[in-house]
Amino acid sequence: MKTTLDELQAFTAVIDTGSISGAAVQLGQTASGVSRALARLEAKLSTTLLRRTTRRLELTEEGSTFLVQARRILEAVEEAEEQMSRRLQHPAGRLRINASAPFMLHVLVPLIGGFRERYPEIELELHSSDQIIDLLEHRTDLALRHGPLRDSTLRARPLGRARIRAVASPDYIARRGRPQQVEDLARHSLIGFTQPESLNHWPLRHPLGESWLIVPSLWASSGETVRQLALAGEGIACLSDFMTARDRADGALIEVLAEANVETLQPIHAVYYRNTTLAARITCFLDYLGECLAQQAWARLR
């Protein structure tokens, strides 16, 4: 049995208006359409709901019992629709977000207060991972990723791009000197990534090309660990501007080999399930994040 809402609406409209023609006017349908809906409903229920005479319609005992349940169903559907409408106007619910530790700390965390103030009914659940995760497996609504995208099963919304550059602390430069050309890096302490290997190809122009594969003296799996090592004067690192913009503005890190830097813009995307119709809470967060990043000097939107 698969009773439809249209059939329930036809049935209750007939009762409310007292006639099939009145129900047709109320529902914006033809009288024959309402009559057919009633006939289908009675056939599915294998019972007579209304006695039809030439002068009026009268509920049977079964019809009276079913009418109570029909009204409850329609009221429940109406309430559900109203709740969804309210959520669109005042988004609510839990939003699970995943990002790398550096992006979480340097980009998202400073923006969370403003988002919660604007959307107090949205509960945020923040997870950090420096590895690419499976959104379904980790029950994640939204992931923020920087770098090339590989997973074609996800939809992506571009949020901006950040430049990558080599940096070191003033203390390190004072102790070891500033490299004057790319080849000088062979005599310096270099901080690299355990994975992916592509992060150890620094965008530096030299006689043989525009990428320099470093041999790290220190290795780390996290971009934030690399940054902290650079701040501590342990060597030269190559990091995204979203991590180092404030450090460079404060003088805690200094760009090295700026004249050899090949402008490389690392894309930043929000990714989510390809077959998902975005909930209002996700759309609100994406819009808010895009709005905030547009005001960041490091975030190149084009």
Image (cartoon, rainbow, N blue to C red):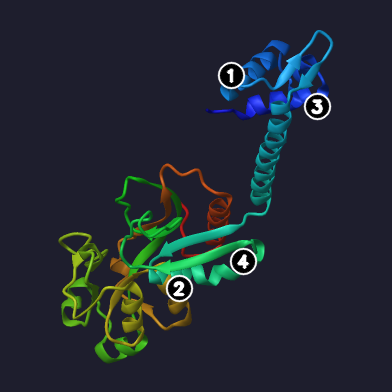
> Under tag 1, what secondary structure?
helix
Please determine whether, in this image, residue 43 is positioned above or below residue 242: above
Q: Earlier in the sequence, mark 4 or mark 3?
A: 3
Number of the front mark, 2 or 4: 4
Residue position for label 4: 116
**Which mark is in front, 3 or 1?**
1
Give the left or right position of residue 47, taking residue 192 as reference: right
Tell me the residue that label 2 is attached to: 105
Q: Amino acid at mark 2?
A: Leu
The disc, 2 or 1, on the residue closer to the chain's N-terminal end is 1
Residue depicted at 49% across the width and 66% down the height: 125
Q: How much space separates mark 3 and mark 1, taking CA atoms?
A: 22 Å
Amino acid type at circle 1 is Ala
Mark sitting earlier along the chain (3/1): 3
Percent coordinates x, y for residue 24 in the rendering: 75, 17
Q: Secondary structure at mark 4?
A: helix
CA gap, disc 2 and disc 1: 62 Å
Q: Amino acid at mark 4?
A: Arg
